[in-house]
Image: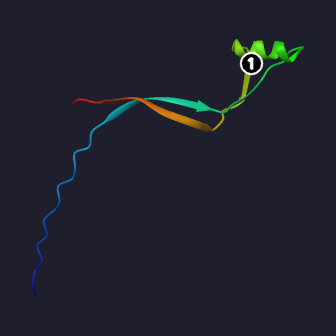
């Protein structure tokens, strides 16, 4: 019987990277108002209520930092 000797390949050293991402989501919001214009103004001022978090529809990498250590 012949023995086969295999060398272990060295595992690559992994680094940690931190990223700043710009993420756009499609969310559903609601507000009570007398007119569409009033509703739009309320939503633009942040006075609305989010009924559900939407799915990510777009993302863009803005910055990537390598962690030292």
Q: Residue 61: which quarter of the image? A: top left
In the depicted view, which residue is nearer to us: 9 or 62?
A: 62
Q: Residue furthest right?
A: 34
Q: Indicate whether 52 appears above or below 1.
A: above
Residue receiving disc 1 = 48
Q: Indicate whether 44 appears above or below 14.
A: above
Kindly identify the residue that appears in the image at 74 percent across and 17 percent down.
43
Q: Residue 25: which quarter of the image? A: top right
Callout count: 1
Q: How is the image coloured?
A: rainbow
Kindly identify the residue that appears in the image at 52 percent across and 35 percent down.
59
Q: Split into 4 quadrants, where in the image is the N terminus?
A: bottom left
Q: Split into 4 quadrants, where in the image is the C terminus?
A: top left
In the depicted view, which residue is nearer to us: 27 or 62?
A: 62
Kindly identify the residue that appears in the image at 83 percent across and 14 percent down.
37
Question: Mark 1: few, some, or many residues within 10 Å (few <14, many ≥20)?
Answer: some
In the depicted view, which residue is nearer to us: 31 or 5?
A: 31
- Residue 56 position within the rendered picture, expressed as x and y whole percent measured from the top left: 59, 37
Left or right: 25, with 15 as reference point: right
Q: Name the element at disc 1.
A: loop
Q: Indicate whether 32 appears above or below 61.
A: above
- Residue 6 position within the rendered picture, expressed as x and y whole percent measured from the top left: 14, 70
Kindly identify the residue that appears in the image at 57 percent across and 36 percent down.
58
């Amino acid at each position: 019987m012949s023995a086969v000797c295999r060398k272990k390949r060295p595992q690559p050293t992994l680094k940690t990277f931190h990223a700043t991402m710009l993420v756009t989501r499609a969310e559903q919001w609601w507000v009570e108002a007398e007119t569409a214009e009033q509703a739009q103004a309320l939503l633009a001022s942040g006075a609305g209520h989010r009924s559900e978090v939407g799915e990510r529809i777009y993302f863009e990498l803005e910055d990537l930092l390598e962690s030292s250590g």
